[in-house]
Amino acid sequence: MNLIYLQNIILLSGSQVPDLLFLVFTLLLVVTVLLVVYLINRRNHFANARFELLEKSKELRKKISHIRYDSQSIIKNQKDEIKSEIAEIQTSIRALKTALKAADEGALRNSELLSNISYTLRTNLNDIMGFSNLLEHEFARQEENELYNFSQDIRSSGQSLLHLLNNMIDISRINAGSFSVVTRNCKINDVIQEVVKTFEPAARHKGLTISFDPVTMPRFSTDVEAVKHILSNLLDNAIKFTEKGFVKIGCEKESSRIIISVKDTGVGIDKAFLPELFEPYAQSQPGYTKTAQKGSALGLPLVKQLLDLLNGEIDFQSEKAIGTTVTISLPLIQPVQEVKKTTTKSKVSTASKLPDLKVSISNLLIVDGDPFNKLLIKKMIPDIKQIVQVANEEDLQKVFEEKKKWDLVLMDTDFIKIDYGIGLLKKYSDTFSYLKKTPFIALMSVPDESKEHICLEEGFKDCLEKPITKGKLIKVLNKTL
């Protein structure tokens, strides 16, 4: 196409052909040179770019190598740090385990110490109250008014100490999570009257009037022993902090709850102290504890903790030098189905009138570490021909090996160690078949319905609570034998 174009130019231009040809060849040469230069530059550019890429790839490989080395170093360092931390944690865990073991051992020692102290205190208090009860009846029979009053004072003091001890132990059990709620059907009027009956002597001694006017109330299900303990603490406080006037107990049904109130005309409590009312060992005024109003400040904290376990509530209204009204409420839970069983008409008996012993006992065995029980029971029932007491398992083994017929065996449930007496009955009944026909009665230091149920399931015929009184002993003997 270029040649045709040149021919046309030659034909058109004529004499100018050589000049045009030179011009065209010159242009072609210039274009060719420029093209060659361009291609050379492009080749050099690609070569430089390739060289730069190679250099950059080398740098990248170096960086990757350094990163890989650094990452391995970092990982190694982190592994070393983690291993070090794990070693420290394991050391800390071992130290914590050692501390926890020491704490558990300390708690166990404290628990054993508390158990031993409480057992010793209960044993001595039960002896004091048992003998004071015996003296009370004897002095009443002989019409020794002054000595009768002395014996009542002794028994009242013993009951106060036992009440304090039970509060301390119950608070410890609740805090340790070992307090179990045992529900059964409750006639609240009977429960209140029973507790009021217990505190009537203390009220009379201070010249106070204690009253309860029962109204018709539905039966409901609750932990009866816990309710008794709650009411006992409230009445104990009311009487303790009231010098003149009255203590009045009220009870009513309100919606789905049972409401019980205890009102007194005592010293009252300053409103500023109310937030601390349920803290153990707290007192509204230190001066009160140094005068006639002595107390351990454990009653109300225990009441609050027991009510929490029963899903109950408490309200406290008090005014200094005017009086106090404590109101508690319990959920009205439907009564449970119970198996009917024959019981005595009332558990409450008067001190002045005792039931007659309707059975004769020739041989009585007492399994208890308290050395005064034998003397106490001998004084209460002098017609028993032979009373034998054993204080350790070795002597008990020898006694049972003699295969002597016993009319009755009184066995402490906490013989040697807590609840061990319960296990001994099964152990020796399996070993000596003749004991299966021997009636065993469980001696219990603390009222405990769940424990009483276990005792009856394990083969005990009945349970007798300490302190042993003549009235309670005769009732159990008549019922069992």
Image (cartoon, rainbow, N blue to C red):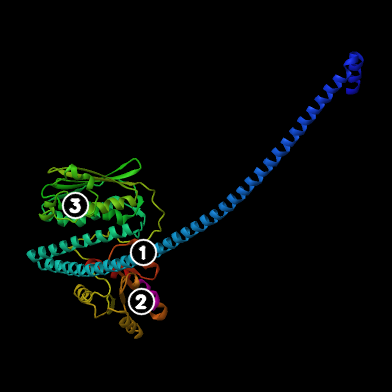
Amino acid at dot 3: Asn
**Other residues around mark 1 within 10 Å, as few (<14) / some (14–19) / many (≥20):** few
Is residue 86 located in the magenta-colored stretch of the structure? no
Name the residue beneath numbered marker 1.
100
Counting residues from the N terminus, which is met first, the one under dot 3 or under dot 2?
3
User: Mark 3 and mark 1: span between their CA atoms?
Assistant: 39 Å
* Mark 2 to mark 1 CA distance (whole Å): 47 Å
Relative side of 422 to 3, left or right = left
* 480 left or right of 372 in image: right
Q: Is residue 216 above or below residue 131?
A: above
Within the image, what quadrant is residue 28 found in?
A: top right
Residue designated by label 2: 438
Examine the residues drawn in magenta and state their main secondary structure.
helix
Q: Residue furthest left?
A: 146
- Front-most of residues 103 and 430: 103
- How far apart in space, not on screen, are marks 3 and 2 (Cα)? 44 Å
Looking at the rendered image, the disc whose residue lies closer to the viewer, 3 or 2, is 3
Asked which secondary structure carries label 3, the reply is: helix
Q: Earlier in the sequence, mark 3 or mark 1?
A: 1
Residue at image point 45% right, 61% down: 84
Q: Is residue 128 visible?
A: yes
Residue 451 on image: x %, y %: 35, 64
Q: Quadrant of residue 146?
A: bottom left
Q: Earlier in the sequence, mark 2 or mark 1?
A: 1
To which residue does mark 3 refer?
237
Residue range highlighted in magenta: 422-428
